[in-house]
Amino acid sequence: MLGIERPVLLAPMAKVAGGELAAAVSNAGGLGILGGGYGDAGWLDKEMTVAGDARVGVGVITWNMAEGGLAAMLSHEPCALWLAFGELAPHIAPIHAAGAKAICQVGTVGEAREAVEAGADVIVAQGTESGGHGRPQFRLRETLAQISDALPDVPLVAAGGMNDQADLDAAHEFGAAGAALGTAFYATHEAIDVREAKGRLVDVDGSDTIRSRVYDHIRGPLWPEGYTGRTARTSLTDEWAGREDELASNVEPHQAAHVEAVANADMGVRVLWAGEGVGAITEVVSAAAVVERFERSR
């Protein structure tokens, strides 16, 4: 379906999955997807130039997509667009008209049904183990099982705590044909972030992550109800997770502290999106080394 040698996709981590990382994943036999976020055309232009001639896709967060964002992405002729976190149906026909595949990320069987009815080519089932934003209700295996039972003929990709072939083999028992990796690719040389952030990924494990809306309030934008974000624990999540309403009433000092933490690469305060699978990360490696953990497609 996606024309790749190894059944692994780069999850489109906003502003982390840039052109260098996406190209490296694709060149190693997987499918690199740039993290287009909300559709920043300037960032995408730059990173697609970095990706060069590599066969890559682009991901976008649809609930807050910039006006003209879809057209801007399609102008680069990506092989696929990965749609997540919002309305899907209006975007799939233009994607197909441009000759690209529509990869749709979902967190529930209901969302999967809607995506398939809208014409999705591939479904990414995201479990609550995943880093970054997502639905907090269901673990990956439960999500995969429900979707594969309801929609047995749709290509299904597992997202959430995936690191290697053993993880994919386990997910295959619940219907997955491929794996989407975010955190594992974050801890690569090609990912866009500072050395301190990648070092923090090596140091923490799954129990050091937490789902909350703390950084929605501190960084913005505030996501719709029903979504939370999984991050590494920090002094801010330790203080405010579960007390986000209180945080919202006096957020300005914490916003200033976070800006300072970003400038100083203070990972005890700065947000770091990370999934429960982070405990498997023991060093920062090349993207190719991550892709090569997966067997060639049979």
Image (cartoon, rainbow, N blue to C red):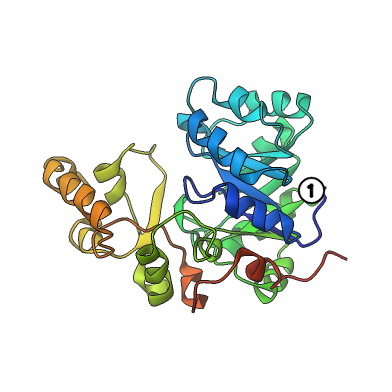
Residue 288 in the image: state x and y as whole percent: 66, 66
Left or right placement of residue 17 versus residue 24 in this view: left
Residue 228 in the image: state x and y as whole percent: 39, 50
Residue 9 visible (yes or no): no
Residue 135 in the image: state x and y as whole percent: 47, 50
| Placement of the C terminus among the 4 image quadrants | bottom right
Q: Is residue 253 above or below residue 87?
A: below
Q: Which of 74 and 131 is in front in this view?
A: 74
Find the residue positioned furthest to the top.
68
Name the residue: 68% across, 67% down.
171
Q: What element carries label 1?
A: loop
Q: Which of 274 and 18 is in front in this view?
A: 18
Left or right placement of residue 32 versus residue 186 in this view: right
Characterize the local packing of mark 1: few (<14), some (14-19) or many (20 or more) Cα atoms within 10 angstroms. some
Q: How many marks?
A: 1
Would you name the residue on which mark 1 appears?
Answer: 2
> Which quadrant of the figure has residue 296?
bottom right
Q: Which of 74 and 154 is in front in this view?
A: 74
Residue 278 in the image: state x and y as whole percent: 47, 70
Name the residue: 47% across, 45% down.
15
Residue 226 visible (yes or no): yes
The amino acid marked with disc number 1 is: Leu
Q: Is residue 230 above or below residue 167?
A: above
Left or right placement of residue 162 versus residue 273 in this view: right
